[in-house]
DNA sequence: GTGTGGGCAATTTTT
DNA sequence: TTGCCCACAC
């Protein structure tokens, strides 16, 4: 710990703000402070650590425990998960039903869909009517920004202004539908908790006593209601430490307010402000690049990070012709690193959007290189997984008609109408013991034989204290035949379902399991968790992490920044910060790929420029492919003809050449037309793709 | 009312 | 590649 870090770690009571750039040890300081407090005799139970993801919380707590085993009892989680726990305990005092369940964005969209149909606000053939997803995002945005829907539409979706009155009706009906079914969405968790703390002084007091120290990581990405929650939780003692970096604020799109961190000292009087400037993560060449990237932001961030690490390689920009060539080149570079003895765990590939890695994923699978992927679609959003979860959700919440509808429609000959008719009989259900008998005695029971099986399932599921894994096993046994019937591609889906018991076994109660799957969806693809995988991650999901060797792909205009962001200057600035976050994850090497072309349905290939965030950087900061046709050998015009064009053998056998990673070596020969054999003193004989190696003569 | 197949558009980021 | 709408057959 350096001096500034030590100061932050050892400060006594009162508010503190650590605001500093990437890799300066903010998170580490937070962890050490937790351990320090415990060392000083603070009860671990009375410390609350709030983080951006639950994974971050458990990682930090693990690190704290390594410093001091007594940290095991420190409380941690996201704002959402802590809010959930509070509502489970105290929710009844604000008239929240005990049986409330949390819904995910897909459920929200389902409810919106139902509401739109019910209100009849969408005219037939109206092509411009916003998608359910768009409406859901808009409503959430207006809540998080705490603006009226009108204001939100006006600012962020002007093209929908004509639908405003209808959208308002949809929003209202959506709120009512949630209330009727005791459903709580992500935003509700925060706002209901605020209501709880605001209206229930005894709860506030109790919590003020329970949590004497509150620490928050990534504070730049919190929204207005989260900041208020923090104030409510700390009114009693003001022992609050927040850390963050305004230059890394990347969630404004969902209502995060960078003002939270900037104005923290105003909200908490006598705040001690700590700034850190020494970077412990990256080499100087990487910092030179990232400092430059962020210095070009409109806000003019004054970041001046330095390191005492010496040496390091210059970040490099490569311009593959298109997606396939990009994947090939990334694979090639990864192979080189692995050949040098780098572990896959030390390598990550970062990109803007979840789908940006699809092509690379197939390449990795073909080469049997194991990887984990963070970001993009998640496992619990798969429709067959949701089918299964619906059966468990109604066990917890009898009023969850959304789930009833879903599971009823799985029965043969039951569609939306029949499901609604059946649901009309289910409204007075109170507890799972009643489900089986009720379903069996339904007037529709004879006409729809599926109801009998369902009834039997619920008879055996009606065990209030059963472990989630047991319940899961029963539901799966029931559901698997349905899955086979319902989906053409059932083998793949059955394979996914096999992962569910494992997931369920990690929670000890049904409530916990349901909340966990929604609040902490398992990352990436289900199944085998490889021992030493490469990491693929969206830039958002990479926040707060680091890897020795980093590749950023699709750094081209239209992809990063995304087309969708390009006509809103504020969105472009957020993309810039996102690029900064991406690049600052690198410790030792940073290689950026910017494909020159992208294929569009219909119009074919279109040229893409280098991302504006990286354009015009001096070659001292970013090594670029040489311009001009001579060298490196141009990409073949189509993947099929690969190799056949590179006739050039630019180095004589025996010539001395230099390579970015391997240093100096001697050309030993060629392999085919596109591979060169070079002997490097320290690294031995290497076969390199001529096109990618970027050798230079010495 | 339910099930199915064709056509067509859209596709950022996440607790 | 998915997901949604629509028209049509049972
Ligand atoms: N005083 C120190 N001595 C040695 N290593 C340190 C020190 N402080 C931080 N580090 C290391 O620097 C790296 C970055 O630290 P950390 O993740 O805490 O930074 P951060 O400020 O939270 O970064 P970011 O904002 O980019 O997420 C980590 O590998 C950490 O172990």
Image: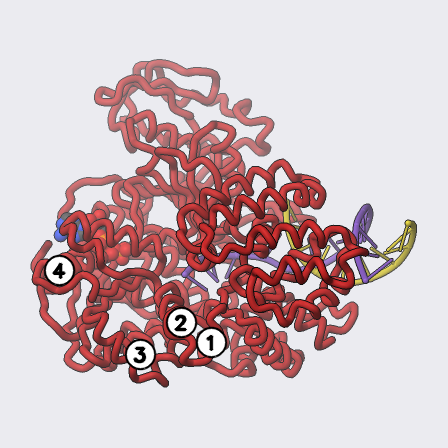
Chain colours: A red, B purple, C yellow
Image quadrant where one finds the C terminus of chain A: top left
Q: Is residue A523 above or below residue A238?
A: above
Q: Is residue A108 left or right of residue A587?
A: right
User: Which residue is denoted by mark 3 in the rendering?
Assistant: A203
Between disc 2 and disc 4, the foreground one is 2
- Share a chain, discs 2 and 1? yes
Mark yes or no: residue A525 visible: no
- Share a chain, discs 4 and 1? yes
Q: Chain of mark 1?
A: A
Q: Chain of mark 4?
A: A
User: Which residue is denoted by mark 1 in the rendering?
Assistant: A96
Q: CA distance from mark 4 to mark 1?
A: 35 Å
Q: Chain of mark 2?
A: A
Q: Is the residue under label 1 in contact with that under label 2 (CB below 8 Å)?
A: yes
User: Which residue is denoted by mark 4 in the rendering?
Assistant: A38
* First reached walking from the N terminus: tag 2 or tag 1: 2
């Amino acid at each position: 710990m350096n001096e500034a870090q030590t100061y932050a770690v050892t400060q006594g009571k009162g508010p503190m703000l650590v605001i500093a750039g990437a890799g300066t040890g903010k998170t580490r300081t937070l962890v050490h402070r937790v351990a320090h407090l415990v060392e000083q005799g603070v009860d671990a139970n009375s410390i609350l650590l709030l983080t951006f993801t639950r994974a971050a919380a458990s990682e930090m707590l693990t690190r704290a425990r390594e410093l001091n085993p007594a940290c095991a009892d420190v409380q941690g989680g996201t704002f959402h998960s802590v809010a959930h726990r509070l509502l489970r305990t105290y929710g009844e005092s604000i008239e929240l039903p005990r049986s409330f369940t949390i819904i995910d964005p897909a459920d929200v969209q389902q409810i919106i869909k139902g509401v739109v149909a019910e209100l009849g606000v969408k005219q037939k053939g109206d092509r411009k009517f916003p998608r359910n997803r768009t409406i859901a995002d808009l409503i959430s945005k207006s809540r998080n920004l705490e603006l009226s829907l009108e204001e939100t539409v006006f600012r962020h979706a002007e093209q929908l202004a004509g639908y405003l009155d209808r959208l308002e009706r949809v929003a209202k009906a959506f709120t009512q539908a949630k209330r009727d079914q005791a459903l709580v969405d992500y935003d509700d968790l925060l706002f209901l908790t605020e209501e709880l703390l605001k209206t229930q002084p005894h709860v506030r007091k109790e919590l003020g006593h329970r949590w004497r120290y509150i620490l928050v990581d990534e504070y730049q990405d919190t929204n207005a209601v989260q900041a208020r929650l923090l104030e409510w939780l700390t009114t009693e003692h003001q022992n609050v430490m927040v850390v963050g970096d305004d230059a890394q604020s990347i969630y404004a799109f969902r209502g995060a307010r960078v003002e939270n961190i900037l104005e923290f000292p105003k909200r908490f009087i006598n705040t001690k402000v700590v700034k850190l400037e020494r970077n412990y993560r990256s080499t100087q060449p990487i910092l030179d690049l990232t400092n430059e990237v962020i210095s070009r932001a409109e806000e003019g961030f004054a970041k001046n990070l330095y390191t005492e690490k010496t040496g390091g390689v210059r970040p490099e920009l490569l311009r593959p012709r298109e997606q396939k060539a990009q994947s090939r080149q990334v694979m090639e570079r990864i192979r080189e690193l692995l050949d040098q003895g780098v572990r896959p765990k030390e390598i990550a590939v970062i990109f803007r959007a979840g789908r940006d890695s699809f092509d690379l994923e197939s390449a990795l699978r073909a080469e049997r290189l194991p990887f984990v992927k963070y970001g993009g679609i998640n496992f619990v959003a798969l429709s067959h997984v949701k089918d299964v979860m619906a059966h468990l959700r109604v066990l917890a919440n009898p009023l969850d008609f959304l789930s009833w509808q879903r599971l009823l429609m799985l029965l043969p000959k039951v569609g939306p109408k029949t499901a609604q008719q059946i649901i009309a009989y289910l409204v007075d259900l109170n507890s799972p013991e009643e489900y089986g008998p009720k379903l069996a005695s339904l007037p529709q029971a004879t006409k729809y034989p599926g109801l009998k099986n369902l009834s039997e399932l619920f008879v055996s599921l009606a065990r209030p204290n059963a472990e989630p894994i047991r319940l899961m096993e029963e539901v799966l046994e029931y559901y698997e035949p349905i899955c086979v019937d319902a989906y053409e591609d059932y083998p793949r889906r059955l394979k996914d379902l096999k992962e569910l018991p494992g997931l369920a076994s990690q929670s000890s109660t049904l409530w916990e399991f349901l909340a966990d799957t929604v609040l902490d969806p398992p990352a990436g693809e289900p199944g085998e968790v490889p021992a030493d995988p490469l990491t693929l991650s969206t830039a958002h999901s990479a926040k707060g992490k680091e890897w020795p060797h980093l590749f950023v792909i699709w750094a081209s205009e239209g992809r990063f920044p995304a087309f969708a962001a390009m006509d809103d200057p504020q969105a472009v600035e957020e993309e810039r910060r996102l690029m900064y976050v991406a690049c600052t994850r690198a410790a030792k090497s940073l290689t950026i790929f910017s494909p020159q072309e992208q294929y569009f349905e219909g119009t074919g290939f279109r040229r893409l420029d280098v991302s504006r965030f990286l354009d015009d950087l001096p070659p001292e900061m970013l090594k670029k492919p040489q311009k001009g046709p001579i060298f490196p050998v141009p990409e073949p015009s189509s993947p099929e003809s690969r190799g056949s064009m590179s006739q050039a053998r630019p180095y004589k056998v025996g010539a001395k050449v230099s390579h970015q990673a391997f240093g100096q070596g001697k050309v030993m020969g060629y392999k085919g037309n596109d591979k060169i054999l070079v002997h490097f003193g320290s690294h031995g004989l290497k076969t390199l793709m001529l096109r990618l190696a970027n050798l230079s003569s010495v």
